[in-house]
């Protein structure tokens, strides 16, 4: 049993790294594909909404499907779809084909994202201790690897179609090779076929509605992933435009944030096991708020870089705790609950540019950062939502022991 669980954990690491690598390869090739299709930044911005829409739809569809069929069946299918869809933007020749390609790529990404997080919850339940944050760190590592590989292939003059096609084949192969190690559906989770008609009516999330706790977790995910989106989209511009830093120096803002996020997620599981998820969210969001406040108010580059680093460290463990809590809230509806939280969280990340951009017409860029600071404060004040209910305390206590 222990060997099976360890293999399932390694397979989950593989799928998280694969997801990060696939999406990272798309990001690295955005400028080349933009030039290939012949569109400007404004049109690309609208097309990226299709990527988000596809991901949101995929998340909502695959969540209940994962509960019905089991993550073991859905994760490899989602990984294969995401891998195959990666080549489509590289083949696009106009705005219409690129839009369709991004919609399909988003769909594949959403399917893989929710199903692999649902499987991660199953692995965490088997280990009886927090392991979710490390999976999310592996996603970030996959993105870093994509940046390195993509930079090399671009320097060789490879076209996006060739590079993304090769990566799609490798991704499909990795998805197939990792599939046998995934855990089988838990015997304690009763499938819809094994329930009586009355039980199905009472237990089905679609019939009884999504619990209030899940919607609160989803709202927190939206706010915190909007904060992450602000760092992704505005940290470099903050140093370059607000503080006058050279382009090379300004790029360090995002690098410092991303590195702190990765390291923090590698350490967050141990912190959560020792002090509990409530402490991770409460103190992590507080630290993030303080870090972004330092970055926003600093008139000099070094303290601003320090602030972005602290912001990343504080945020690093927050989102994995929300996903984990959603998955553990109801074993029979883990996929559906994770899809709600991940879906709204993903919309929050996409909303970062849309919210901050218009605010810059009324105030300096650095002052707009107090909106995500406020969101971090809300998360810190409502961290108690992660405190287990009396019926679930025995299981969580076992996870922490």
Image: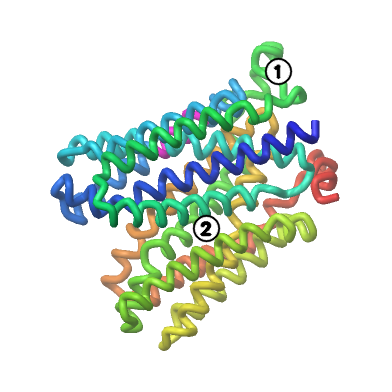
Q: Is residue 132 visible?
A: yes
Location of the N terminus by quadrant is top right
For the residues bearing labels 2 and 1, Cβ distance under 8 angstroms: no
Q: What residue is drawn where x is 64% and y is 30%?
A: 182
| In the image, residue 221 lies in the stretch drawn in magenta | no
Q: Quadrant of residue 271?
A: bottom right
Task: Tell me if I can see residue 60 in this picture.
Answer: no
Q: Main secondary structure of the magenta part?
A: helix
Say which of 39 and 138 sits in front.
Answer: 138
Residue at image coords 57%, 27%: 66
Q: Position of residue 96 (x, y in %)?
A: 18, 36
Q: Residue drawn at (77%, 34%), measured in percent from left and top?
A: 3
Q: Is residue 57 magenta?
A: yes
* Residue 31 picture location, percent across and down: 25, 54
- For label 2, the crowd category at 10 Å Cα-Cα, with few meaning under 14, some 14 to 19 and many 20 or more, is many
- In the displayed image of the protein, which residue is found farthest to the front? 156
Residue bounds of the magenta highlight: 55-62
The correct choice, above or below, for 394 with respect to 136 in the image is above
Q: Is residue 356 left or right of residue 58?
A: left
In terms of secondary structure, where does tag 2 sit? helix
Q: Earlier in the sequence, mark 2 or mark 1?
A: 1
Query: What residue would you read off at disc 1?
Result: 199
Which residue is drawn at the image coordinates 61% and 71% (left, top)? 287
Q: Position of residue 116 (x, y in %)?
A: 57, 37
**Measured Cα–Cα span from mark 2 to mark 1:** 36 Å
Is residue 24 positioned above or below 84 on the image? below
Residue 191 horizontal side relative to residue 250, left or right: right
Q: Which residue is mark 2?
A: 224
| Quarter-of-image position of residue 396 | top right
Looking at the rendered image, the disc whose residue lies closer to the viewer, 2 or 1, is 2
């Amino acid at each position: 049993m222990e060997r099976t669980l360890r293999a399932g954990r390694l397979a989950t690491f593989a799928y998280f790294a694969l997801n990060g690598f696939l999406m990272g390869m798309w990001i690295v090739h955005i400028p080349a594909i933009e030039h290939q299709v012949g569109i400007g930044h404004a049109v690309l911005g609208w097309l990226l909404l299709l990527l988000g829409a596809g991901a949101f739809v995929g998340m909502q569809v695959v969540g209940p499907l994962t509960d019905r069929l089991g993550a073991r069946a859905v994760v490899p299918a989602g990984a294969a779809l995401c891998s195959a869809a990666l080549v489509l933007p590289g083949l696009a020749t106009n705005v219409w084909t690129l839009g369709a390609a991004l919609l399909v790529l988003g769909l594949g990404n959403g399917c893989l994202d929710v199903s692999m997080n649902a499987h991660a919850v199953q692995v965490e339940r088997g280990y009886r201790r927090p392991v979710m944050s490390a999976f999310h760190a592996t996603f970030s590592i996959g993105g870093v690897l994509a940046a390195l590989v993509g930079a090399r292939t671009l320097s060789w003059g490879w076209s996006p179609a060739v590079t993304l096609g090769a990566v799609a084949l490798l991704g499909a192969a990795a998805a197939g090779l990792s599939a046998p190690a995934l855990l089988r559906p838990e015997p304690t989770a009763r499938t819809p076929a094994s329930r009586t008609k009355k039980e199905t009516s009472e237990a089905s999330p679609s019939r009884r509605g999504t619990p209030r706790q899940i919607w609160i977790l989803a709202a927190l995910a939206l706010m915190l992933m909007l904060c992450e989106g602000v760092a992704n989209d505005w940290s470099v511009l903050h140093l370059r435009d607000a503080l006058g830093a050279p382009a090379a120096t300004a790029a360090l803002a995002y690098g410092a944030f991303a590195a702190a996020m990765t390291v923090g997620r590698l350490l967050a599981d141990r912190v959560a096991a020792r002090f509990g998820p409530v402490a991770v969210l409460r103190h992590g969001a507080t630290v993030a708020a303080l870090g972004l406040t330092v970055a926003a108010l600093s008139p000099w580059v070094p303290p601003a870089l320090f602030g972005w680093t602290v912001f990343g460290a504080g945020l690093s463990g927050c989102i994995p705790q929300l996903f984990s809590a959603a998955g553990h809230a109801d074993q029979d509806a883990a996929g559906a609950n994770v899809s709600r939280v991940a879906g709204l969280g993903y919309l929050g990340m996409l909303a970062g540019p849309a919210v901050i951009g218009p605010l810059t017409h009324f105030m300096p860029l650095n002052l707009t950062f107090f909106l995500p600071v406020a969101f971090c404060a809300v998360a810190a004040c409502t961290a108690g939502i992660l405190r287990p209910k009396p019926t679930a305390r025995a299981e969580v206590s076992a996870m922490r022991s």
